[in-house]
Amino acid sequence: MEVRLVLSTHGGADTSANHPCQAAPPDAPLLLEACRQLDEYFSRQRKTFQLPTKQTGTPFQQQVWQVLESIPYGQTRSYQDIARAIGNPKAMRAVGQANNRNKILILVPCHRVIQKDGQLGGFEFGVDAKKWLLELERKT
């Protein structure tokens, strides 16, 4: 089963009948828990997630994703910082590619990775969504 999260910059939690959690089957407790934790995150009530985040990827990608999970809520790191953290300081572009392969956005917070000059860099849902997520975390 594939679940897609749609980010909206209009703010507020979607409590309508169209809310994605309303469509979650009752026999999918992990999906229901993920929805609950994401709702709390977007309501500024959660800063960390207690969900399994296993992804398929290369050993390099796994290293990058592990470092991403260690970036504290409301903080950012540069692609270079991540490359240094995995012991490969010249691998900034490869870190960016690993971020791009991350399919568990928000739970594995690739939006917290920016360029060393402070520019936002890329993001699967666009720079506006990345900026919105970073601002959400800074307002808490």
Image (cartoon, grey):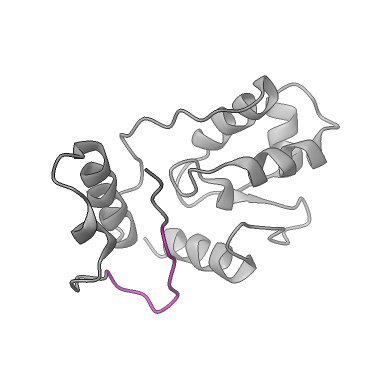
Image coords of residue 30 (percent x, y):
25, 37
Q: Is the C terminus in the top left, top right, bottom left or bottom right quadrant?
A: bottom left
Q: Residue furthest right?
A: 90
* Residue at 61 percent of width and 28 percent of height: 57
Assess whether residue 101 is covered by the magenta stretch.
Answer: no
Give 22 or 115, whichever is nearer the viewer. Answer: 22
Which region of the structure is painted magenta? 5-13
Q: Residue furthest bottom?
A: 10
Image coords of residue 125 (percent x, y):
57, 63
Q: Residue 50 appears in which quarter of the rendering?
A: top left
* Residue at 48 percent of width and 43 percent of height: 104
* Residue at 19 percent of width and 60 percent of height: 22
Give 96 or 26, whichever is nearer the viewer. Answer: 26
Where 8 sits versus 121, above or below? below
Image coords of residue 81 (percent x, y):
71, 37
Secondary structure mostly taken by the magenta-highlighted segment of the chain: loop
Q: Is the N terminus in the top left, top right, bottom left or bottom right quadrant?
A: top left
Give 34 or 81, whichever is nearer the viewer. Answer: 34
Compared across the picture, whether 123 is left or right of 10 comes to: right
Q: Residue 61 appears in which quarter of the rendering?
A: top right
Compared across the picture, whether 24 is left or right of 134 comes to: left
